[in-house]
Amino acid sequence: MARLLRASCLLSLLLAGFIPPSQGQEKSKTDCHAGVGGTIYEYGALTIDGEEYIPFKRYAGKYILFVNVASY
């Protein structure tokens, strides 16, 4: 019985994935950075304590990884 219930739940989830979104939903696109121009080297960031400004041009020619942990 539990096996049949599990199989029916999995089948329901599988079939639900094939249902297209309703026509009433509109896709929207938001450009959050419309005014941004130039290169990354023209910008910088404050340290986490806000005491020091670090220009990104300091890292020119090096490999760096930017991790964005913020959301809008």
Image (spheres, grey):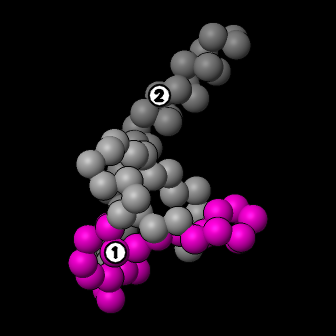
Residue 47 shown in magenta: yes
Residue farthest toward the bottom in the current orientation of the protein: 35
Q: Amino acid at mark 1?
A: Glu
The residue beneath circle 1 is 42
- Quadrant for the C terminus in the image: bottom right
Task: Determine whether the residue tagged by mark 1 lies in a helix, strand or loop.
Answer: helix
Q: Quadrant of residue 9?
A: top right
Task: Find residue 49 and report its horizontal and vertical position in percent.
Answer: 75, 65
Q: Residue at x 58, y 71 (%)?
A: 53
Which residue has dot 2 on it? 11
Q: In the displayed structure, does residue 21 sit left or right of residue 9?
A: left
Q: x, y percentage for residue 14?
A: 43, 33
Q: Position of residue 55 (x, y in %)?
A: 45, 67
- Residue 61 placement (x, y as % from top left): 26, 48
| Residue 38 drawn in magenta | yes
User: Between marks 2 and 1, how big is the CA–CA gap?
Assistant: 53 Å
Q: Quick check: 54 above or below 10?
A: below
Q: Nearer the viewer, mark 2 or mark 1?
A: 1
User: Who is closer to the viewer here, 55 or 5?
Assistant: 55
What residue is rendered at 61% in x and 19% in y? Answer: 6
- Which three-letter amino acid code belongs to the residue tagged 2? Leu
Question: Residue at coordinates 60% horizontally, 15% vertically from top-left?
Answer: 4
In the figure, residue 58 lies in which quadrant? bottom left
